[in-house]
Amino acid sequence: MSMFHSMNTTASALTSQRLRMDVISSNMANVDTTRATFENGEWQPYKRKSVVLKPQEGNFSSMLNTAMNKPSHAGEGVTVSRIIEDNETPGELLYDPEHPDANEDGYVELPNVDPLREMVDLMSATRSYEGNVTVFNANKSMMMQALQIGRS
């Protein structure tokens, strides 16, 4: 096992959570965007996006150890699988016949972004990021102490 394995694992989580926070920020910035994409001859409202994470693929030696039933790394970290749009949740309809995007009945479809849900997701991503920073700093401190022991 590499001396830097735990730091690489933590770094992958930091990168993934940072992207998650960026996507949540984009959702919040577009909470009122009624003209995000042009489809089928008309403007569509912004669709909420979310990040899908998956375990990071191991290197060849860890896969070989697993295949040979030998102990291997507990984990290789996490990576972003993809960013998906929420096309399932409908946007709220707001009655505003004066709005340029109002349909023939006077309703405007708003983005399917729920600010409360986004704030909860942002808090979760932030806490995960902070936890991984703590782990990274603890690993760094242990390595520095090991170097100090080696010097004496």
Image: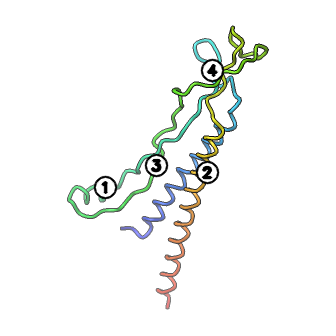
Q: What residue type is labelled 2?
A: Met
77 vs 20: above or below: below
Q: Distance between the residues labelled 3 and 1?
A: 17 Å
Q: Distance between the residues labelled 1 and 4?
A: 45 Å
Q: Distance between the residues labelled 3 and 4?
A: 30 Å
In the rendered structure, the answer to whether residue 84 lies left or right of residue 61 reads right
Task: Indicate how the structure is coloured in the image.
Answer: rainbow
Sooner in the amino-acid sequence: mark 3 or mark 1: 1
Residue at left offset 51%, top offset 34%: 84
Sooner in the amino-acid sequence: mark 3 or mark 2: 3
Which x, y percent locates residue 22?
62, 44
Q: How crowded is mark 1: few (under 14 residues within 10 Å), some or many (20 or more)?
A: few
Sooner in the amino-acid sequence: mark 3 or mark 4: 4
Mark 1–mark 4 CB contact (< 8 Å): no
Question: Where is mark 2, residue-wise?
Answer: 123
Question: Where is mark 1, residue-wise?
Answer: 60
Local SS, label 1: helix
- 67 and 134: which one is in front? 134
Sooner in the amino-acid sequence: mark 2 or mark 1: 1
Local SS, label 4: strand
Q: Which amino acid does label 4 sit on?
A: Gln
Local SS, label 2: helix
Question: Where is mark 3, residue-wise?
Answer: 79
Q: Which mark is residue 44?
A: 4
Q: Where is the N terminus found, in terms of image quarters?
A: bottom left
Which x, y percent locates residue 13?
50, 55
